[in-house]
Image (tube, helix red, strand yellow):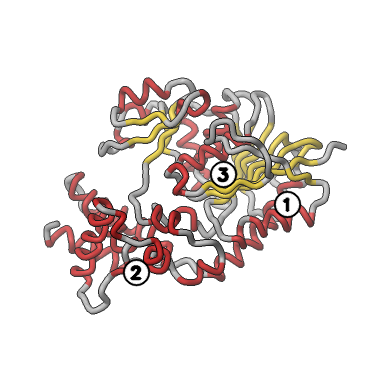
Amino acid sequence: MTPYLIGLAQGVVNAASREKPADALLREQLKSQGRLHPQDAADVTHAVFSYYRWLGWLDSKKTLDEKILQAARFALQFHEAPQRFPDAELVSRSVPQWIHEQMEVSGAWARALQSEPRLWLRARHGNGQRVAQILGHCNVFGSGKLSDTLEYTGHDDLFLTPEFHAGEFELQDLNSQAVGFVCAPNPGETWWDACAGEGGKLLHLSALMGNKGLIWASDRAEWRLRKLKRRTARAGVYNYRSVMWDGGPRLPTKTKFDGVLVDAPCAGVGTWQRNPHARWTTTPQDVAELGELQVRLLSHAASSLKPGGKLIYAVCTLTRGETVNVADALTKNLPELEPLAIADPLQRDSVAESSQLVLQPQDHGGNGMFIAAWRKAAA
């Protein structure tokens, strides 16, 4: 890297904090550079993320620019010879110590965190092969319903492609796609995406429903719903209504639903491969507070279910305080909800044996994800 590019990376690292995440600062920094060559932008991005990914290995006596270069060397060494890094060392140095109290930190998980994240696409229904051929550098993940799930291994900016602007595909993590498959909404049903955000999972629900039926989308942030509106227009999704909801007991509609998806705010531990800065800013207090919030959101949303309706809980985190503890608390607090066994939609011939599903980044290369399901007892 040139001194100029190292200086850009230094600027992001110096300014990054809990309130100003490195990924957001990086986007601002690169945008402010105007006509920065795409490869230069990629190099700066790689330098910043490698710095946080390998922070536990860096020599504290070195200057920041030396640390950035040292992190880049660790990243290259791991890519070329990952066996040179023992599991025990990866487990102890890749993550903060408090996380060991919240989950099992295995060598496989730590090794996945130090790997470069993979880029996943979801093509418009039935168009996976065609989109893969047009874009190139695409691997189709599976067959049947998974034939529209693609891994992109190229280096083009996909947001600039005509196919993206035509709504031919969405950028959506593999395990986020699994959430939609677990929901399994039918055409003509009425669903509520209670924490819809910018609409990634809503778009998938609509595709699975053939754009038929109705989806209510709510969020507490109006700016997210504005982005959702732009995304749905591009994707040609019209079977939805959006509304503000603060997560409280006063629901945004009196409608009763066939299914409710609560993709709740979480600590994001499952995204630490893709967002390594968050490893060093997330705290145990975050986990505790978010766990309480998640139980409240689920309890309020569950009251909108029809008899026989499904409640799906999804979080891109792996801490016990936000996963099994939340699911067990809801089952205990709401006896009218019966745990619903779900299969792993990414595994061929998977059998539905449990109402809770954990998807690890080392499994297929997606974000860590926890999914739980219940069905409301019939009247």
Q: Nearer the viewer, residue 140 or 5?
A: 140
Crowdedness near tag 3: few (<14), some (14–19) or many (≥20) residues, C-alpha within 10 Å? many
Q: CA distance from mark 1 to mark 3?
A: 16 Å
Say how many tags the image has: 3
- Are the residues flagged by discs 1 and 2 in contact, CB closer than 8 Å? no
Q: Nearer the viewer, residue 29 or 23?
A: 23
Helix, strand or loop for disc 2: helix
Q: Nearer the viewer, residue 227 or 59?
A: 59
Q: Which mark is residue 56?
A: 2
Residue 293 screen position, x and y as percent: 64, 60
Crowdedness near tag 1: few (<14), some (14–19) or many (≥20) residues, C-alpha within 10 Å? some
Q: CA distance from mark 3 to mark 2?
A: 35 Å
Q: Earlier in the sequence, mark 3 or mark 2?
A: 2
Q: Is residue 234 above or below residue 327?
A: above
Of the 4 image quadrants, the one containing the C terminus is: top right
Residue 333 screen position, x and y as percent: 79, 56
For disc 3, the marked residue is 196
Q: Is residue 31 above or below residue 71?
A: above
Residue 119 screen position, x and y as percent: 37, 41
- Are the residues flagged by discs 3 and 2 in contact, CB closer than 8 Å? no
Residue 288 screen position, x and y as percent: 61, 67
Residue positioned 52% across, 26% down in the render: 145
Residue sitting farthest toward the right: 379
Mark 1 or mark 2, whichever is nearer to me: 2
Residue positioned 42% across, 62% down in the render: 278
Q: Earlier in the sequence, mark 1 or mark 3?
A: 3
Helix, strand or loop for disc 1: helix
For disc 1, the marked residue is 300
Residue sitting farthest toward the bottom: 61
| Location of residue 24 by image quarter | bottom left
Identity, as a three-letter code, of the amino acid under mark 1: His
